[in-house]
Amino acid sequence: MSDARQSGSSTVWSLVLFTTLALFAATLYAIFVVAPVEQQMGIVQKIFYFHVPSAYAMYIGFGVSAVGSAVYLLKRDPKWDAIGVAGAEVGTLFCLIVLLTGPLWARKAWGVWWTWDPRLTTTLLAGMIFAAYLALRSMGNAGEVEKRFAAGLALFGLVDLPLIHYSVQRWRGVHPTVITGKGGGLESEMYWALGLSFIAFTGLAVLLIWARASAERQREETARLRFELMHR
Amino acid sequence: MRALIAALVLGCTMLITPMVVAESPPEPETAASESQKDAAEERATQFVGVRGPEAESVSGGALLLAAYAIVWALLFLFLLRMRGLQRQTAEELERLSAEIRASGDR
């Protein structure tokens, strides 16, 4: 990479980083100071402001992983494989956040930690598919066959994302539909908090995918150098 | 004669029973579909903010605190993992550089 391009990349990185940090500060202020406490559920409803954007960040991560994997299968360029790995890891991270914060809200709202609601089940399924992807990639140094198989798994996982999104509209369940479908919406202060949180989590997902893809590319490059050195 | 009467009774029963069944109103099915519809409509469709003194005090506070702690803890663990990966790569590069230097000296 040329010096000018690297410098430009660093500038964009720093810009996204500081914007995201500022947005997180504003988001926390909006959630705990500006947005009112919800009438039925009380203060526990504030989990919603991190839970829903985390689910959105999960979509970004898994979507990026699927796109990276698809391009890798077509071009066999390691750069896209690194993007696929980064997207899968970041998506799984946010999926874990969704699957752990959701039950804390559900315990108060539904009286149970977990129920086999369509949205919960399809989200768990997506998490398991991409956990399998990561397990496959973590088995020693992944060869070409493992990379291609994992890429196929990421594309399979992509099919589950629309199922998660539309599960609350197509199937009966208990998961709230406040901001999608026929939901009644939020109060304006709640929309502000949620909107800021969405932008902050988008920035965070982009930063994490970017950093992880960069680390993966360096790791791959090191492995390639080691291989060349051994066979010189 | 008895056999003829029995045959007539059986024939009438076979003809009339399906007609009675067809004409009877399907009440249980309607009730079931109504209850399913109600169940489908039980999901929350809006969040309404409480104003003034009705606002609930911190009954779900522990759950909220746990949720936010999980978010930050997982993000921190992910950053630690990335740091570990980068350290491994740096050490590997250092080792490779040393090997290249050593092979150049020979």
Image (cartoon, coloured by chain):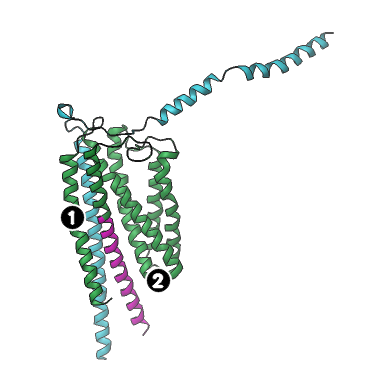
Report the quarter where the N terminus of chain A lies. bottom left
Q: Please give left or right for residue A114 compared with residue B33 in the image.
A: left
Q: Return the mark for residue A77.
A: 2
Q: In terms of secondary structure, where does tag 1 sit?
A: helix
Q: Residue furthest bottom?
A: B106
> Which color has been applied to chain B in this rendered view?
cyan
Tell which chain the image draws in green: A
Q: Which mark is nearer the camera, 2 or 1?
A: 1
Q: Return the mark for residue A29.
A: none
The answer to whether residue B36 is above or below residue A51 is above
x and y, in percent, of residue B51 in the image: 18, 30
Of pointers 2 and 1, the one earlier in the residue sequence: 1
x and y, in percent, of residue A184 in the image: 32, 34
Q: Which residues lie in the magenta part? A: A203-232
Q: Residue furthest front?
A: A188
Callout 1: chain: A
Q: Residue at x 40, y 60 (%)?
A: A67
| Residue of label 1 | A21
Residue B60 within the magenta-colored segment of the rendering: no
Residue type beneath disc 2: Asp
Q: How many marks?
A: 2
Q: Please give left or right for residue A219 compared with residue A143 in the image.
A: left
Residue A212 within the magenta-colored segment of the rendering: yes
The answer to whether residue A194 is above or below residue A1 is above
Q: Nearer the viewer, residue B40 or A100?
A: B40
Q: Residue furthest top?
A: B1
Distance, label 2 to label 1, CA atoms, is: 33 Å
